[in-house]
Image (tube, helix red, strand yellow):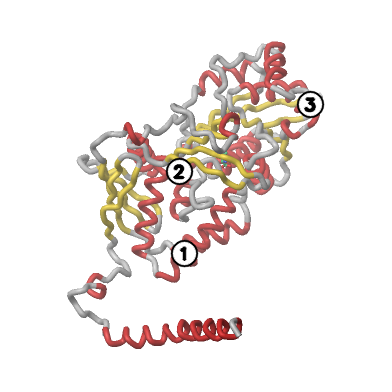
Amino acid sequence: MSKGTVVLAYSGGLDTSCILVWLREQGYQVVAYMSDLGQDEDFDEARNKAKKLGCIEVIVDDQKQELVEDFVWPSIQGGLVYEDRYLLGTAIARPCIVRGMIKTARRYKAEYICHGATGKGNDQVRFELGCYALAPDIKVLAPWKEPQFYERFPGRNELFDYARLHDIPLPVSPKSPWSIDANMIHVSYESGILENPATFPPEGIFQMTVDPEKAPDTPQMMTINFKEGFPTSVQLTGDATLLTSPLEIFTTCNRIGAKHGVGRIDIVENRFVGLKSRGIYEAPGLTILHKAHQDLEVFCLDREVRKIKSYLSERMAEQVYNGLWYSPEFELTHKCIQESQKNVTGSVTLKIYKGNVYILGRHAPVSLYNEELVSMNVQGNYEPTDAKGFICINAVRLKEHQRVKQTMHKIQSQ
Ligand code: ARG
């Protein structure tokens, strides 16, 4: 008797292949789901492998466009950066994958979703909270948190034995001594030999970007246009084509950033489950887009609005990191941020050179920047004598502070 249908987040690797067979052994019908997020992967090979392992269907879901439009664009608009450095390349892809899995579950009338994330990371939280939020009736199976599963597979040797027993093709290349998560936005490297936070990233670890030291000696200039905080087009200097589709804009920034060694970081971050972990990331295109957006935003936003927006950005980044894309707090924060971006419209010109993104200039059709008002050469609608009073009144508080300090000092030395 079948226990029902399960949609498995399948990667083609050893772990999820063993999970696939194990699920069948447990009496489930399996739909293998793969999201094509632009990662460098042989989907045909993975599809054939999954078919051989006896799943009822293999889905390769091309999600590149929705990833960029529905997840990357809001995160650029929102200026989402976790703990000042991580651009959330894995975290924003998870809710996209979850959406694809839930659609698939509905199509196949599946009652279950299964993922191969472990019990110590953020990804389990993102998968599961995402599923429960979008489809409260669906149940999540997470074998790496089931004693029945992990006691049977305490190490890789047991997985290999199981694979041999069930004709699961063994990986041809040896597993890298770290864990990789890749999509078109970024590649992350964690665990294994990287767990010692003092070890340097080994030579050749990076898959996406060139070493900034080996990057071209000729810089690339480019102009990115924005409307209400969203990128709308990009133009490379020396090339007449104006690229306007989100996917084209993103892949162009990615290509240029990768070629010039932009967007590598090595950090220790705080996981939602309470652990600190070391991660090495590369996100070339996203880095360029974030820098350009940030420059235009400061140019366009009112000073006080910018402060509130930056608080909201931090909250939203935390929500995304913690797997709360589909949450009421995210909805509210996202709406407020969209409201703040109404006049973040204009263009920024950049120079990309040896791992850096230099801002060369910016332009906005309408902005709070008033060249005449700020000019040293023109008085404009600004009375310098007013500044005298402004400073005097602001000094009242500072003078009072000094008075109290001196009084305290006197009392203490008596
Ligand atoms: N630490 C990053 C994050 O939580 C990257 C996680 C990568 N995931 C993986 N399964 N290797 O977003």
Q: Quadrant of residue 101?
A: top right
Q: Is residue 58 above or below residue 231?
A: above
Residue where numbered disc 1 is placed: 339
Q: Quadrant of residue 240?
A: top left
Residue where numbered disc 2 is placed: 68
Marks 2 and 3, Cα distance to the nearest angstrom? 39 Å
The quadrant the C terminus occupies is bottom right
Cβ of mark 2 under 8 Å from ligand 1: the answer is no
- Nearer to me, 404 or 24: 404
Tell me if I can see residue 62 in this picture: no
Does residue 274 appear left or right of residue 226 in this picture? right
- Which label is found at residue 369? none
Mark 1, other Cα within 10 Å: few <14 / some 14–19 / many ≥20: few
Question: Amino acid type of disc 1?
Answer: Glu
SS at mark 1?
A: helix
Residue for point 42% across, 32% down = 208
Residue for point 57% across, 83% down = 408
- Which label is found at residue 151? 3
Q: Is residue 408 above or below residue 239?
A: below
Q: Quadrant of residue 329?
A: bottom right
Marks 1 and 2, Cα distance to the nearest angstrom? 21 Å
Q: How many marks?
A: 3
Marks 1 and 3, Cα distance to the nearest angstrom? 51 Å
Q: Position of residue 260 (x, y in %)?
A: 33, 37
Question: Amino acid type of disc 3?
Answer: Glu
